[in-house]
Amino acid sequence: MEGPLNGYNASDIQVLEGLEAVRKRPGMYIGTTGPKGLHHLVFEIVDNSIDEAVGGYCNEIQAIIHKDNSVSVCDNGRGIPVDIHPQMGIPALEVIMTTLHSGGKFGGSGYNISGGLHGVGLSVVNALSSRMEVTVKRDGSVYRQCYEQGIPVDKVEQCGTTNENGTIIHFLPDPEIFEITIFEKEIIEQRLRELSFLNKGLRITLLDEREEDPKRKDFHYNNGLKDFVAYINKKKEVINERPIYFESKKEDVIVNIVIQYNNGYNESIYSYANNIRTQEGGTHEIGFKNGLTRVINDFARKSNFLKENDTNLSGEDIREGIVGIISVLVKEPQFEGQTKTKLGNTFIRSIVESAIFENVEDYLNENPVIAKKILDKAISARRAREAARKARELTRRKSALESTSLPGKLADCSSKDAALCELYIVEGDSAGGSAKQGRDRNYQAILPLRGKILNVQKARLDRVLANEEIKALITAIGTGIAEDFDIKRARYHKVFIMTDADVDGSHIRVLLLTYFYRYMRQLIEEGYIYIAQPPLFGLKRGNDMNYFHREEDMDEFLKESKQKWTVQRYKGLGEMDAEQLWHTTMDPDNRTILQVNIDDAIRADEIFSDLMGENVQARKDFIQENAVYATNLDI
């Protein structure tokens, strides 16, 4: 670690405004008051410690989930300044904790590079906590201040001496603000692991004291992004065992990139700016893709893989089977897009593009055998893409000649307002028949599937487009697929997967989710995909009928009722008549549904690869690890 403590003090803290609005409109600052916003509180505090690490002042961060669902984050950085702020006349610690947009992130000498919500992090967490306690170790002393709902309940006081430095922040989320206040360890764990990969050498630990036998999880990766790509590809067959890796610095921008190919057909690009995941991409990702396409084509021509009359390989061909991680550190990042997760600084594009070209060219020249494997894979991908293009063109021509382009088995709805329309993808004709009879024809459409669709995890696009069930799906939904995909053409804003609660039904559900994840991911990201939850049990007594999704709930009801009921176990959707199916599963006033979300793209990718990929052992491991959570098993 480097840098004296006296280089960071109260004069480095700039103040912009107070906290009044935060509790009134929390969504403006953390996005949502649901689970995502709750966990964002932890990440904002951790990001503050990460900024210390990036600056070279901290090498250890601890996160602790306490039994009461409060959280502590501790670091061994410089400690938040406690001297009197020159403008405000109160300790800098109190300014940072109680004033919006205050922090070293806005001044010229506090932080050169930072993540978080550009300085609002700590004060926003304070405002949205029922209580918070901050302990600072600095300049040989220990200081402490407590707050309730963002308001100090005492003054910053010196309460001891120490030879250590650092900050400890302990907070309890306010139940008046948040829908739930119970933290999920796995969500925090995934982000801490990610941050540890992105900051090589940094040690981050997590302890969950709510567990019966709490054990500290340690995240510490000396090889940084190389360890990250190995983690993502750990269950896949890789093409270049030694990944393409480099770190460069130009115009005060640090570029850190790793590339490793596997034998799959999917492209996985993960980009970060100042340790923030840029899910919407941005200029660094564009530079990465452009540079890679240019250098691979250049090398292919120089090494005679591409002849004079051959067209260039497309970016999609070159990125088949790639896992690429891009991390840039920028002094003043500009975040754009719907969720502010798109890097907008235009000059970054050329910096990343030239860095990619130089370093990948060197790697290919030094590793001709690997270079040949990468090019062979790209050329094979191009052949498949050409076959897929011809299949799409044939489908378009066929659709233009027919009076209607919709699949014959689709029972469409009468409304043309996509925002109101729902599509139910149902398993088999018998369930399809009940659904067609029971639905509201104004806004509910039914598409029965005959058998299981293709496992797209193991297939290229040309095979995907040749599958009749998938073709019906593509046509019914209307968005197109792959490079033709356009969410604005979606004919339904709710797409329900409705299958039987048995092993076959679960398999069909996973096949469909794999398809949507790989080829229509934006439908999931925009919240269009749902899982219908038909009941497993029905209790009948005379004209009275009650439905249950869990056996425990039914048993509890029978225990309290003390009357005789006839129990029916619904093994398939076909066992319910049209009225029952409407009432239990399709009526918006009664139905139980699950919206499909992607909270963590890396974990989602891993799960789909485990469940649907070639690695049998990975699938067995996943089933054994998760069997305890399984429900709806038909044994």
Image (spheres, rainbow, N blue to C red):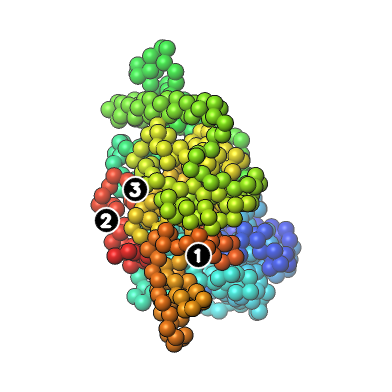
Residue 612: image tag: 3
Q: How far apart are the two marked residues, 2 and 1, measured between alpha carbons?
A: 37 Å
SS for dot 1? helix
Q: Residue at x 38, y 28 (%)?
A: 384
Question: Can residue 352 be seen at all in this image of the molecule?
Answer: no
Q: Position of residue 462 (x, y in %)?
A: 40, 31
In the rendered structure, the answer to whether residue 260 lies left or right of residue 406 reads: left
Of residue 72 and residue 635, the one placed in the foreground of this image is 635
In the rendered structure, the answer to whether residue 592 lies left or right of residue 430 reads: right
Q: Position of residue 12 (x, y in %)?
A: 65, 57
Question: Can residue 565 be seen at all in this image of the molecule?
Answer: yes
Of residue 379 and residue 82, the one placed in the foreground of this image is 379
Give the tally of numbered discs.
Answer: 3
Residue lying at the far top of the rendered structure: 308
Query: 10 Å neighbourhood of mark 3: few (<14), some, or many (≥20)?
Result: some
Q: How far apart are the two marked residues, 3 and 2, measured between alpha carbons?
A: 11 Å
Mark 2 or mark 1, which is nearer to you?
Answer: 1
Disc 2: which residue: 620
Disc 1: which residue: 580
